[in-house]
Image (cartoon, rainbow, N blue to C red):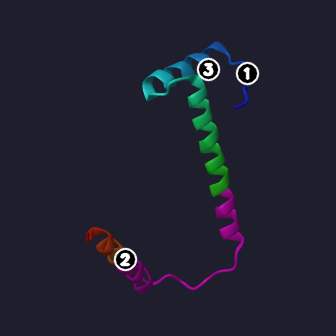
Amino acid sequence: MSTMNISLPDALKSFVDEQVSQRGYGTSSEYVRELIRRDQDRQQLRGLLLAGAGSAPSATASAAYFEGLRDQVRKTAGRRAKP
């Protein structure tokens, strides 16, 4: 694992220290890694949303479409519930 040193103003350092202690992180590095992972996820989601927004329109989702999805979930849940 590589290391990276960052400089923070005292107010931000205090904030990070508070987050570490209040939210159960072991170290400030764990907290920063989590922030970076969340930012990566956010950027990926943004890319997917933009791709979807730029794609050609598809058929309108009707009540029957959603009922079909519910049926699939019920069937899957029923198979998992059986021993």
Q: Which residue sits furthest top?
A: 10
Residue type at the position of mark 3: Leu
Name the image quarter holding the C terminus. Answer: bottom left
Asked which secondary structure carries label 2, the reply is helix
Asked which secondary structure carries label 1, the reply is loop
| Mark closer to the observer (2, 1) | 1
Give the residue at x 42% y 78%.
Answer: 69
Q: Which residue is mark 2?
A: 70
Separation of marks 2 and 3 at Cα, in angstroms: 46 Å
Give the residue at x 43% y 24%.
Answer: 22
Give the residue at x 64% y 38%.
Answer: 36
Separation of marks 2 and 1 at Cα, in angstroms: 50 Å
Residue type at the position of mark 1: Asn
Could you tell which of marks 2 and 1 lies nearer the N-terminus? Answer: 1
Q: Is residue 72 above or below residue 2?
A: below
Could you tell which of marks 2 and 3 lies nearer the N-terminus? Answer: 3
Magenta residue span:
46-72
Q: Is residue 43 above or below residue 3?
A: below
Name the image quarter holding the N terminus. Answer: top right
Label 3 neighbourhood size at 10 Å, few (<14), some (14-19), many (20+)? few
Could you tell which of marks 1 and 3 lies nearer the N-terminus? Answer: 1
Label 2 neighbourhood size at 10 Å, few (<14), some (14-19), many (20+)? few
Q: Which residue is mark 3?
A: 12
Q: Which residue is mark 1?
A: 5
